[in-house]
Amino acid sequence: MSQFSFAVITMSDSGARGLREDTSGAALKELFTDHGYRLCFYKIVPDRIEFIVEAVLQAIEAKGADLVLTTGGTGVSPTDVTPEAMDQVFDKEVPGMAEAMRAASLAITPKAVISRGRAGIRRQSLIINLPGSRKGALENIDVLLPALDHALEKIKGSTVDCAEG
C-alpha cells in the first residue's frame, strides 16, 4: 500500500461541458485508491493549454499531489495539446516512462505510434500523461505501476539504491 497522494486531471472539451462521462478518470481514481493512494484532486478541463497548466499547478502547488495523472489530449488531433502544456509544467522529463508506455501499447495496437504522452517531474511531484480512453489509460499505467512508489520515493529524495528498492 502506498502513502502517496494523487490527482487525476481529464482533458476533454465535451467532458468539461458535462456532455461526456469521464470513464478514464473514474478508472484511474478507482485503481489508485485500491492501491492505497489518497485522492487529493480531480478535475475535468477543456483541451486548452492554459486550463491544463492551471489544473496541474493547482494539483501540485495547492493540493500537494505527489502523483498527477492526466488523461486525454495526447494524440495528434488539432485539439490534443497536453504534451505542449507540459512544456510549462515540467522541471525535468522522465522519457523512459513514456517510452515504456508506447512500447507496451505497440504490442496491442499499431495506433500507439501516434501517442504523444509524456512523463516528468515538477518540484517533488511526478506527472504522467495517459491516453483519454479508459482502456488506453489503464493499459498504459499498468506498465508503470510496479515502479511508481520507488520513483516517487526517489523524487522525494530517497537515497536507497535503485537495485535495492
Image (cartoon, grey):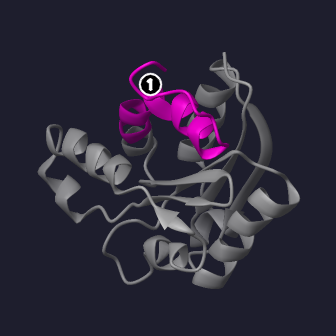
Q: Residue at x 68, y 52 (%)?
A: 124
**Does the magenta segment cover residue 62?**
no
Q: Is residue 154 above or below residue 127?
A: above
Image: magenta residue range: 139-165
Q: Residue at x 37, y 47 (%)?
A: 97
Q: Write down the quadrant of residue 58 in the picture.
A: bottom right
Residue 96 position within the rendered picture, expressed as x and y whole percent measured from the top left: 32, 49
Q: Write down the quadrant of residue 91 in the picture.
A: bottom right
Q: Is residue 44 above or below residue 25?
A: below
Q: Residue at x 29, y 61 (%)?
A: 115
Residue 25 position within the rendered picture, expressed as x and y whole percent measured from the top left: 60, 45
Residue 126 position within the rendered picture, expressed as x and y whole percent measured from the top left: 59, 51
- Which quadrant holds the N terminus? top right
Q: Is residue 29 above or below residue 11?
A: above
Q: Dot 1 corresponds to which residue?
A: 146
**Closer-to-camera residue (94/128):** 94
**Does the magenta segment cover residue 163?**
yes
Q: Secondary structure at mark 1?
A: helix
